[in-house]
Image: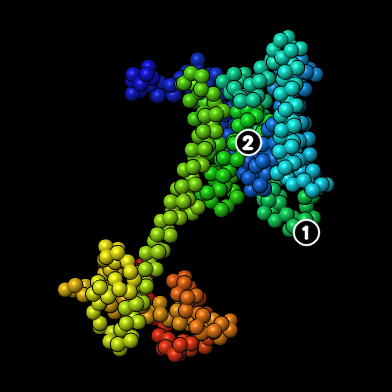
Amino acid sequence: MELLTSSWWIFDEIGKYFLVEGSTRRWVMFAAILLGISSGVVGTFAFLRKQSLLSDAMAHAALPGICLAYMFTGVKDPLLFLLGASVTGLIGAIIATEIPRHSRIKIDTAIGLVLSNFFAFGIVLLTIIQKNFSGNKAGLDSFLFGKAALLARYDIYVMGSMCLLLLGITFIFYKEFKLLTFDRSFAITLGLPVRYLELLITLLIVLAVMVGLQAVGVVLMVAMLIFPAAAARQWTDRLGLMILISAFIGAFAGAVGSFCSAIVAKVPTGPVMVVVCSFLLIVSMFFAPNRGLVPKWLRLRKSRQRIRRENILKSCYKTCEEHNNWKMNFTIENFFAYFKLPRYLLRHYLRSLIKREFMSHENGNWQLTEKGLKKALQIIRKHRLWEVYLTKKMDIASDHVHRDAEDIEHAINNEVLHQLDNELKSPQQDPHGKAIPQNVCFSEQERKTR
């Protein structure tokens, strides 16, 4: 509650980062941001290459390497820990990938075997260290869940150097990694050393995992590799932009995580970083323009409304065609009997057609306008041309083509319609003997109101 006594408390906390006594906060935030950037960049390739579980196995395989490095040297040196963790992590990754090649065991099972066995071995070594090395684990248990707030300046130097190394290697081999990720066979035909490049990507993933162990921990490090990349994938289909977005999400999570751990007592940085990444992933899954669930639902809803409007116009055209009267009036009962929709929904679609100037309304009667008749002619033309195509080119019986034409008539654009007309040599009748309307082109202003 003390934090809420003033509405300016958050600005006071931010201001401390620019003071002399805020040097520790600055270093921790700098390390967390670097970790987020490197995890986002390298994690993009792990995500696209479907190596998410493999990175989890690497993280758990790092624990025995850290313990062995301490047991052999007796020194708590981040560089030695990083070296030991990298060795065992790389060994675990190689074992996990080689087992499926030489046995009937699948990759997911192999990863599970490596993950559980290496992690269990690490826990055993931690117990041995606790009993035989001065009665403590020398802080090695912090690698399980991470303790970014306890990072010393030397730790951050090591982390920063490794992060810059990861980013540099990724930048140098960007084209090769891109080709290997999306078309391995083509990379082989170009004569690229595919096996060595794959090993280099695996090594980068291992190093990215090892760099983050002290800040995020073994258990949660895989989330920092995968969540930013998975969130970025929702926003773009371009690899370069995906890497930038993933790096930004990782950096933002690092900044927020370090800030929250600084202002709230006993709140660890690593878990907050993962929570922020999870939140951004959920937001991306729901609201990303192309892949988000909400935009997809809105596009589907818009498409359904357009199809129903077109079906109303089509039904009006067929009725006018049957009675040879293009100025027929329609009542709400006529539409209700044909579509079986609730009256409020029918009225909504009819108001929409009036707004688009496809229909006019007077004294409770609806009538096709000239623009609406042109639109209905175009829909009917698509329907009947497709029926001719299915019967003549696909050899489908005429009594089996109506349902397919009902679906496709709403998806055919003008270019495909023109190709159909040329392919079929402008037929005059559909398979049922009904006339095919001549081609109708909309003006630019009419297209905007569709």
Let me know if residue 175 appears in the view.
no
Q: How is colour applied across the structure in the image?
A: rainbow
Location of residue 76 (image quadrant) = top right
Let me know if residue 126 appears in the view.
yes
Residue 286 versus residue 83: which sits nearer the camera?
286
Task: Work out which residue is located at the far right of the displayed protein and give it.
Answer: 102
Which quarter of the figure is the N terminus placed in?
Answer: top left
SS class of the residue under badge 2? helix
Query: How dense is the environment of label 2, judged by Cα within 10 Å: few (below 14), some, or many (20 and up)?
Result: many
Q: Give the residue pinned by disc 1.
A: 189
Residue 222 is labelled as 2
Residue 240 versus residue 76: which sits nearer the camera?
76
Instruction: Name the residue at 40% across, 85% down.
Output: 437
Q: Describe residue 244's horizontal placement relative to residue 14 as left or right.
A: right
Q: What residue type is labelled 1?
A: Thr
Residue 395 versus residue 440: which sits nearer the camera?
395
The earlier-in-sequence mark between 2 and 1 is: 1
Query: How dense is the environment of label 1, judged by Cα within 10 Å: few (below 14), some, or many (20 and up)?
Result: few
Is 298 located above or below residue 430 in the figure? above
Q: What residue type is labelled 2?
A: Val
Instruction: Name the residue at 43% across, 21% down.
Output: 13
Q: Where is residue 32 in the image (x, y as percent from the top left)?
A: 57, 29
SS class of the residue under badge 1? helix
Is 290 located above or below residue 449 in the figure? above
State the CA–CA distance, disc 2 to disc 1.
33 Å
Location of residue 81 (image quadrant) = top right
- Of discs 2 and 1, which sits in the foreground? 2
Which quarter of the figure is the C terminus placed in?
Answer: bottom left
Instruction: Name the residue at 55% across, 29% down.
Output: 271
Q: Do the residues labelled 2 and 1 touch (CB within 8 Å)?
A: no
Is 266 located above or below residue 277 in the figure? above
